Amino acid sequence: MASPSSLPKLLLLACFTILSSSIRSSAHDFSIVGYSPDDLTCIDKLINLFESWIDKHGKKYKSLEEKLHRFEIFKDNLKHIDERNKVASNYWLGLNEFADMSHDEFKNMYLGSRQISCLKGMSPIKNSSTGMSRACLSRSTGGRKEPLLGSRTKDLVVCSCWAFSTVAAVEGINQIATGNLTELSEQELIDCDTTYNNGCNGGLMDYAFAYIVSKGGIHKEEDYPYLMEEGTCEENRGESEVVTISGYHDVPANDEQSLLKALANQPLSVAIEASGRDFQFYSGGVFDGHCGTELDHGVAAVGYGSSKGLDYIIVKNSWGPKWGEKGFIRMKRNTGKPAGMCGINKMTSFPTKNK
């Protein structure tokens, strides 16, 4: 006879067994945040929601026990999302593809540990660049500067936020200078830029800019594709064309006006603290939630604007197009704090390119 403490698990097992053959195959009618109030009222509706979420995101589990474990995490995440959505007024959270991951799992996979974060907690080296390059000012559409967005939002999974941030900025200035949008290789930086940077164990964007200058350019992504892991350096890939930059420049720390002045010309590599739980499930709006200034994630600032009285910076992330606003997040500016929202004003740099 089962003990009383094991009954809930047995009942849940029974529920999954029964529902697995009867749950509708069509996708759940997801709201903007991925659930409706009715989904929170009883276990049947929660299971139904979970099964629909599994179908929506193509999740597969090795066993029923693993599925039960993920369901418990899913429930806890849903509780957090719903509680935050009740009090946050300018942004909202949603059931994205990370909803079956605990926050610690998410941080370890996408940000690294606190001891070895994606940015390693290192101080950037100073550069010899003599100033900002002259670049064409882009037209603005609803605050988002379209020519500054660069290539599609990439999903770099468990490795190299610093490489993504570097490449996004180089792609942007190259497009402005040449008129051509060319997707570039994060993998080359991960494999070959090893003097100061440490691949999937962390790095800094300034070091990566310096590497590109010293090597005479960086390969296209199609010639040096992303592997989602560290590989063997292959700097010489036949006669493959490379994209060059002439130098790089650091924006004064904790100076939002200098950041915006630079951002009016081109995309920027910036660092933020992204380890807050709300970041995992950010779905839209102007983010003004709780976060610190311990930088642990490299991203790209690509534009700025205002909406309903809120000023924001548009940030391009590397967690895939299903996260946030198609891979982007709007982060509040004019916070009154020198470091800015999540420390975004603390460490900013950009590449330069002679036309």
Image (cartoon, grey):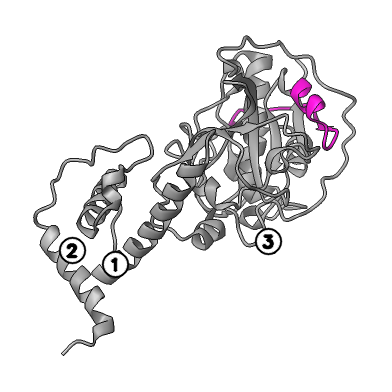
Q: Is residue 216 magenta?
A: no
What's the residue type where badge 2 is placed? Phe
Mark seen at residue 116? 3
Mark seen at residue 281? none
Mark 3 or mark 1: whose residue is earlier in sequence: 1
Is the residue under label 1 in contact with that under label 2 (CB below 8 Å)?
yes
Q: Which residues are magenta?
A: 238-262
Q: Give the SS element for disc 2.
A: helix
* Count of numbered circles on the image: 3
Q: Give the SS element for disc 1.
A: helix
Is the residue under label 2 in contact with that under label 3 (CB below 8 Å)?
no
What's the residue type where badge 3 is placed? Ile
Direction from residue 272 to residue 283 in the image, left or right = left
Mark 3 or mark 2: whose residue is earlier in sequence: 2
Q: Say above or below: 7 vs 252.
A: below
Camera-side residue of 172 and 33: 33
Q: In the figure, residue 286 lies in which quadrant?
A: top right
- Badge 1: how crowded within 10 Å, few (<14), some, or many (20+)? some
Q: Which residue is mark 1?
A: 68
**In the image, residue 321 lies at what x, y percent?**
45, 35
Q: Which residue is mark 2?
A: 16
Q: Say above or below: 334 vs 307.
A: below
**In the image, residue 112 lies at what x, y percent?**
60, 58
Direction from residue 39 to residue 82 in the image, left or right = right
**In the image, residue 126 lies at what x, y percent?**
88, 40
